[in-house]
Each structure stands twice: as C-alpha cells, then as structure tokens.
Image: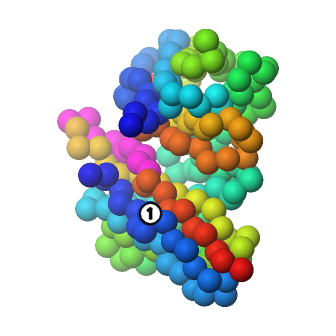
Amino acid sequence: GAGVSQSPSNKVTEKGKDVELRCDPISGHTALYWYRQSLGQGLEFLIYFQGNSAPDKSGLPSDRFSAERTGGSVSTLTIQRTQQEDSAVYLCASSLGVVAPQETQYFGPGTRLLVL
Amino acid sequence: SQELEQSPQSLIVQEGKNLTINCTSSKTLYGLYWYKQKYGEGLIFLMMLQKGGEEKSHEKITAKLDEKKQQSSLHITASQPSHAGMYLCGADIVQQTRTGGFKTIFGAGTRLFVKA
C-alpha cells in the first residue's frame, strides 16, 4: 500500500528565497508530524497536527517556519527567507491518530533542502 | 531494496535475554544514528556514531560502527520490558550525483517485543 510521500525529494534554493515542502500522509492517518535532520545531528521535532485540533508548533525554530494541513490530509511546510542553516532533510511522518503522538509513526522519504 | 537495510524487521525476546539489531549498507556511512520509539511515547534519539570501530553505550544499549563504516549493530544486554519499541537507524551517505554532497537515509525499523 501507499506510504507517506513527500515532494520535492530534493530542493536547492538561494538564501532569502521562500520554499514549500509537501507531505501526503498515509490515507486514514489523522496525525501528521514534521521533523528536521541537519547533517551530523539527530532528528528535531518541528510541528504536529492531530485532526482538527490546533497544531503543536513548539518545535518550530523561528517565525520563518510555518505549516498548514488542508482538509486534514496534505500538509505544507513553508520556510520564508531561507538561511543556510535551514539546509537539512525535512521528514514527514503520519500515524493513526488514536493515541497520537504516543503511537507508531510512519516516515516519508524526506525532502533534502540545500540553501546556497 | 533499501539503501539502508535493517534486520530483523521484528524480534520477540524473553526478558533478560540479549539481542542484536543490525543496520547495513553497501555504501560508506558517515554519521550513523540510532533512534527508539517506545510504545506509548514519541521518537527519541539514542546515539550517533561517526568513526570506524566506534562504540557507544546508553544504559544497557551498546551500538558499534564497524571498521569499514558500512554496518552498525545495536546490542541490548539483559533486555527489559522497558526496551520494547521500534528501533530505527539512520545514516548520512554520499550522494551519487554530479554535485555530490551527503544525504540522510533511514532503515525500515525493527520492532522489539520483550516477554516478561
């Protein structure tokens, strides 16, 4: 069956530009998570959506980062005025949402962002 | 097939027994990461290995990166029910593109069950 998909798989952008990263969760999963992994570091939690509830934005590193989830399915992570330190792999995960976030999360392949 | 093979996919052990989880690649691994997702909790970072032959421990969990830096093993001594969960390995590998650079990849995870 289809897993979590993300697009684009790779993105190269210039410093100061805005970028949008997309995540399609597994069908039927109501919980969706965004993480970031910078080279040489562990996974960093960014934001978590659960159904129609207000998202948990506690992990967003600055106000340049925002995320939306339309119709309870597809999510878009937007980074405004990108900086070189934003270069990382951005991972999306989804889970059933029955006891989220305390349940198994299924990860997408990631979007590799390089800010020049 | 995945670039980072993790085995076994699932494992059931009796409490008190030792176990090993492997993470293997045909490519050189730069920065090997181990994560754990406990049942009832979110994803947590365990440890990172970078040098060939490097070994690190976290409580009763020991991870090693082989000399060739193509395989890592995670070993749990005297397993406890608290060790149950999903173990995920991730690694940085060189991208096979004209521009080179690194990319981060993940294994499929190993689900560990510990019988009391």
Figure check: B81 above or below B41: below
Figure check: A9 above or below B72: above
Q: Is residue B100 magenta?
A: yes
Q: Residues within 10 Å of mark 1 (few under 14, many from 20)?
A: some
Where residue B83 appears, as percent x and y from the top left, is 67, 71
Mark 1 belongs to chain:
B
Where residue A32 appears, as percent x and y from the top left, is 62, 30
For residue B4, side relative to residue B61 (left or right): left
Figure check: A57 above or below B98: above
The amino acid type, in three-letter code, at marker 1 is Gln
Res. B44 image quadrant = bottom right
Residues shaded magenta: B98-106
Res. A57 image quadrant = top right
Question: Which sits in the foreground, A83 or B103?
Answer: B103
**Structure colour scheme:** rainbow
Figure check: A64 above or below B94: above
Helix, strand or loop at mark 1: loop
Residue at 22% x, 38% y is B97
For residue A90, side relative to residue A62 (left or right): left
Residue matched to label 1 = B9
Residue at 55% x, 74% y is B12
For residue A94, side relative to residue B106 (left or right): right
Let me know if residue A62 appears in the view: no
Let me know if residue B113 appears in the view: yes
